Amino acid sequence: MMVRVPAVLTAQEVAHCREVMAKSQWVDGKVTAGEQSAGAKKNLQLAETSTEARELGNLVLGKLGRNELFTAATLPLRVFPPLFNRYDPGMTFGTHIDNSIRFATGTPVRFRTDVSATLFLSAPEDYDGGELVVEDTYGQHTAKLPAGDMILYPASSRHHVTAVTRGSRWASFFWIQSMIRGDTQRALLFDLDIAIQGLRRTIGESAEVVRLTGVYHNLIRQWGDA
């Protein structure tokens, strides 16, 4: 399941992120790549432990905590501290699958990567190339979103970032460990949640809506890890 989450950050917040990133020191993006993906990864990123990455990561996490669409789509148990990367002309990330388990740097906390997230921090007209391409059984799906928008997709998916040929593509990327391990179950719960919200808006808190809400929560009890 791929879900677009619009306007995670406001234009002012995107501008703040870019201002901080522009003044920061960049390192080789391979520092957070696994053995397989390191050979395919050609980009730059802010050091995970830098003051700038932590400041901006806390901003993103604070916004996600209040975003109902993000919560409905991921049912998060843990969110990996957001990272920040940059693709200049000639940089790319070849086809790969994200590591299944990640450690938050400097902590003993392990994350199972159920959902991958890319939060775009560059306007699409400011660079050529740089599309995120996600593969599934239905083919390839391309994302190149306005600055401040985010795309969510299964971390088990094969995906790549096409080469940037003009400008610079800046983004935040991170992973979510969901309370619901399987993408199929998460998709069913997401559809059910959206339907319940729509019914509540149109017909109010009826007995049927209450019953469906109970089904939703009982399925989380059955499938959830938390």
Image (cartoon, rainbow, N blue to C red):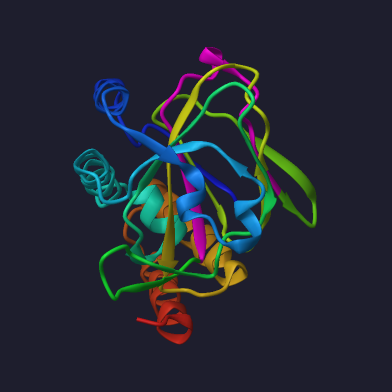
Answer whether residue 128 is magenta in the image: yes
193 vs 54, nearest the viewer: 54
109 vs 72, nearest the viewer: 109
Left or right placement of residue 155 versus residue 119 in this view: right
Left or right placement of residue 132 versus residue 117 in this view: right
98 vs 116, nearest the viewer: 98
Percent x, y of residue 209: 40, 65
**Residue 217 in view (yes/no):** yes
- Where residue 51 sits, quadrant-wise, is top left
The residue lying at 35 percent from left, 37 percent from top is 8
The residue lying at 53 percent from left, 36 percent from top is 43
Answer whether residue 108 is magenta in the image: no
Residue 124's place in the image compared with 199, above or below, is above
- Where residue 144 sits, quadrant-wise, is top right
186 vs 214, nearest the viewer: 186
The quadrant the N terminus occupies is bottom right
Residue 221's place in the image compared with 155, above or below, is below
Residue 186's place in the image compared with 159, above or below, is below
Percent x, y of residue 196: 44, 59
**Residue 196 in view (yes/no):** no
The residue lying at 50 percent from left, 60 percent from top is 115
Range of magenta residues:
114-134
- Where residue 92 sits, quadrant-wise, is top right
Can you name the residue that lies furthest to the bottom here?
222
The quadrant the C terminus occupies is bottom left
Percent x, y of residue 81: 31, 55
Count of numbered tags: 0
The residue lying at 33 percent from left, 50 percent from top is 68
Percent x, y of residue 222: 46, 86
